[in-house]
C-alpha cells in the first residue's frame, strides 16, 4: 500500500477511496489521514470528489471478495476505463482479478464468513464484518506511520492540516 500511495503522490495523482458500510468508514478514516499527510485524497461520493483518471489511484475494499458488491465492481470498471490504477483490499484470497493492479489480502473474518454452526452458535464473537473492519483500521494506521516517515512528515505538520472547524 505504501508503495502504491507513494507512487500516486510522485505522479502528482490523487488517491480516491471507496468501500461500503463500515468498510467505507475505515476508508474514510484513511482518506482523512492521507489528507493530514499532505496528499490529495478524497472518497467516492463526496461532493468535492474530483474525476479520476491517469496518474490517480483508486483504493477499494470488498471484504467478502470481488463480485460481492455491485457498486465496487462498477467503480472499478470506471477507474479502469479512465486509466487510474486500482488497488483492491479483500479478506478473500483470489488468484487474478481483471482490472486490479494491486491486491491486498487481509485474512480476517467478514460477513461472508459469519455463519452459524449446526448448534446455532455464531462462529466467532464479533458480529458480521467487525474483525475485517478492525483489521483495516489497524492496517491503515500502520500504513500512515510508514508514509509519515517516508514523506518526512511530523505529527506537528499533520496537525497543522487538521481542521479548525470542530
Image (spheres, grey):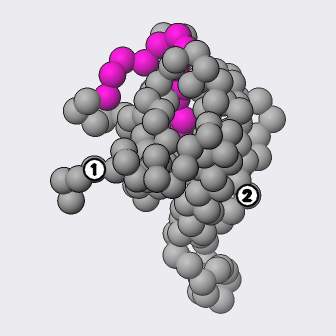
58 is within the stretch colored magenta: yes
User: Is 102 situated above or below 122?
Assistant: above
Question: Quadrant where the N terminus lies?
Answer: top right
User: Is 8 situated above or below 140?
Assistant: above
**Residue 165 or residue 129, whichever sits in front:** 165
Question: Quadrant where the C terminus lies?
Answer: bottom left
Element type where label 1 sits in the image: loop
In the picture provided, is 95 more to the left or to the right than 64? right
> Mark 1 or 2, which is nearer the eye?
1
**Residue 21 or residue 165, whichever sits in front:** 165
Which residue matches tag 1? 163
User: Is 62 situated above or below 99?
Assistant: below
Q: Identify the residue shown where x is 66% and y is 45%.
A: 149
Counting from the top left corner in percent of width and height, residue 76 is at 52, 26
Can you tell which quarter of the image residue 123 is in? bottom right
Counting from the top left corner in percent of width and height, residue 67 is at 57, 38
Q: Is residue 157 visible?
A: yes
Q: Identify the residue shown where x is 77% and y is 30%.
A: 96
Majority secondary structure in the magenta region: loop
Q: Is residue 23 visible?
A: no
Pointer 2 local density, CA inside 10 Å: few below 14, some 14–19, many at least 20: some
Can you tell which quarter of the image residue 31 is in? top left
61 is within the stretch colored magenta: no
Can you tell which quarter of the image residue 113 is in? bottom right
Q: Identify the residue shown where x is 63% and y is 53%.
A: 145
Sequence-earlier tag: 1 or 2: 2
Q: Identify the residue shown where x is 52% and y is 17%.
A: 12
**Residue 126 or residue 36, whichever sits in front:** 36
Counting from the top left corner in percent of width and height, residue 86 is at 59, 26
In the image, which residues are magenta?
Answer: 49-60
Which residue matches tag 2? 107
Pointer 1 local density, CA inside 10 Å: few below 14, some 14–19, many at least 20: few
Amino acid at each position: 500500500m505504501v508503495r502504491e500511495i507513494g507512487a500516486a503522490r510522485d505522479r502528482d495523482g490523487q488517491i480516491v477511496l471507496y468501500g461500503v458500510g463500515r468498510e467505507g468508514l475505515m476508508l474514510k478514516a484513511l482518506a482523512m489521514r492521507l489528507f493530514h499527510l499532505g496528499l490529495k485524497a478524497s472518497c467516492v461520493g463526496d461532493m468535492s470528489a474530483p474525476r479520476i483518471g491517469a496518474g490517480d489511484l483508486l483504493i477499494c475494499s470488498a471484504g467478502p471478495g470481488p463480485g460481492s458488491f455491485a457498486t465496487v465492481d462498477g467503480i472499478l470498471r470506471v477507474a479502469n476505463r479512465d486509466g487510474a490504477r486500482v488497488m483492491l483490499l479483500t479478506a478473500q484470497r483470489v488468484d487474478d482479478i481483471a482490472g486490479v493492479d494491486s491486491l491486498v489480502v487481509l485474512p480476517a473474518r467478514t460477513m461472508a464468513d459469519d455463519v452459524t454452526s449446526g448448534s446455532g452458535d455464531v462462529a466467532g464473537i464479533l458480529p458480521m464484518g467487525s474483525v475485517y473492519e478492525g483489521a483495516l483500521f489497524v492496517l491503515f494506521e500502520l500504513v500512515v506511520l510508514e508514509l509519515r516517515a517516508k514523506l518526512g512528515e511530523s505529527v506537528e505538520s499533520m496537525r497543522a492540516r487538521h481542521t479548525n472547524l470542530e
